[in-house]
Amino acid sequence: MGVPDALQERRERVFLVLAGIFLCAMTLLNVIGITRFVQLGPMALAVGVLPYPLTFLCTDLVCELYGKARANFLVTVGLGLNFFILFVLLLGNSIPAVPAENMPPWQILQLAAPVALPNGQVVEQSVGLYQLIYATTSGAVFASMIAYIAAQYCDVQLFHFWKRVTKGKYLWVRNNFSTLGSQMVDSVMVISVTFGAAFFRGDIAFNTLLVLIGSNYLFKATVALLDTGPFYLGVHYLRRYLQLGPNETAVPGGQAEEPS
């Protein structure tokens, strides 16, 4: 017997909310990226990292409630959005700007001194607002894309690996072990790609690189462990709200995904 239309609509709306949070957090990582670093106790973090752990909670919920295929679809959409962001940045940078004399004053920033960015570009003391955003964001988007491909697909694969190993039991195992592993991949790759050129030029010390990787991972791992509670609550209440049986997924047709 098929799923009633009203129930299927409810299931798709929940997926849309989870997908929206996932894509929003990922986009914030790319747009505000390394525009600012913040100090949280012993951790030095790029401000764009703050919402990023939510992406792993969302993919874990989608894995649990909608299955592996739907989670991979969401990650693929996010990858396409990464390309779109990079395309818009490149397009905006390639189109000639309005002459400086016609530019609004608030679009011109006066820096105290030239700033060398991790990609090697030097931002002069007088610079347009967009050029500053482009300079600090474009390299971060590229690094994010590489880390994103590895980490998010890794998260989905590890989640279902642990689900098979535990035969569908112990939510905390697949939630934590999939996220902790994939976020290690993400932290190492995004910092290595973003600051790799600066390291090889001698502009950044190896110890500093390790501190950045360690800070990134410590923050993400801490959030991953703390989201175990929200993950359990989300699965518990959403399974009731979506009227799902044990191991059933909320895909069209109500197919069940049995752990093997």
Image: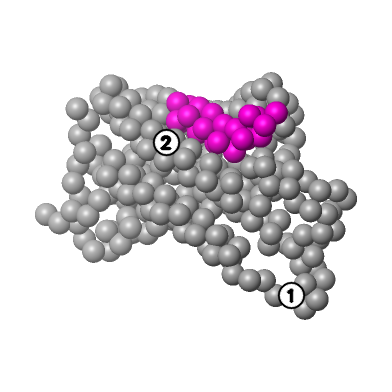
Point 80% across, 68% down: residue:
106
In this figure, which colouring scheme has been used for the structure?
one colour
Q: CA distance from mark 2 to mark 1?
A: 42 Å
Tag 2–tag 1 contact (CB < 8 Å): no
Residue 160 magenta-highlighted: no
* Residue to which mark 2 is pinned: 150
Point 88% across, 50% down: residue:
112
Residue 129 as seen in the image, left or right of residue 213 = right
Point 61% across, 28% down: residue:
213
Q: Nearer the viewer, residue 170 or 53?
A: 53
Q: Earlier in the sequence, mark 2 or mark 1?
A: 1
In the orientation shown, which residue stands out farthest toward the front?
201
The answer to whether residue 140 shows anywhere in this view is yes
Q: Amino acid at mark 2?
A: Ala
* Residue to which mark 1 is pinned: 99
- Residues shaded magenta: 179-202
Point 82% across, 59% down: residue:
126
On the image, which quarter does residue 3 sit in?
bottom left
In the orientation shown, which residue stands out farthest toward the left?
1
Task: Please tell me how crowded label 1 is: few (under 14), some (14-19), or many (20+) other residues with Cα within 10 Å.
Answer: few
Residue 194 as seen in the image, left or right of residue 76 = right
Q: Amino acid at mark 1?
A: Pro
Q: If the image is split into quadrants, where does the C terminus sit?
A: top left
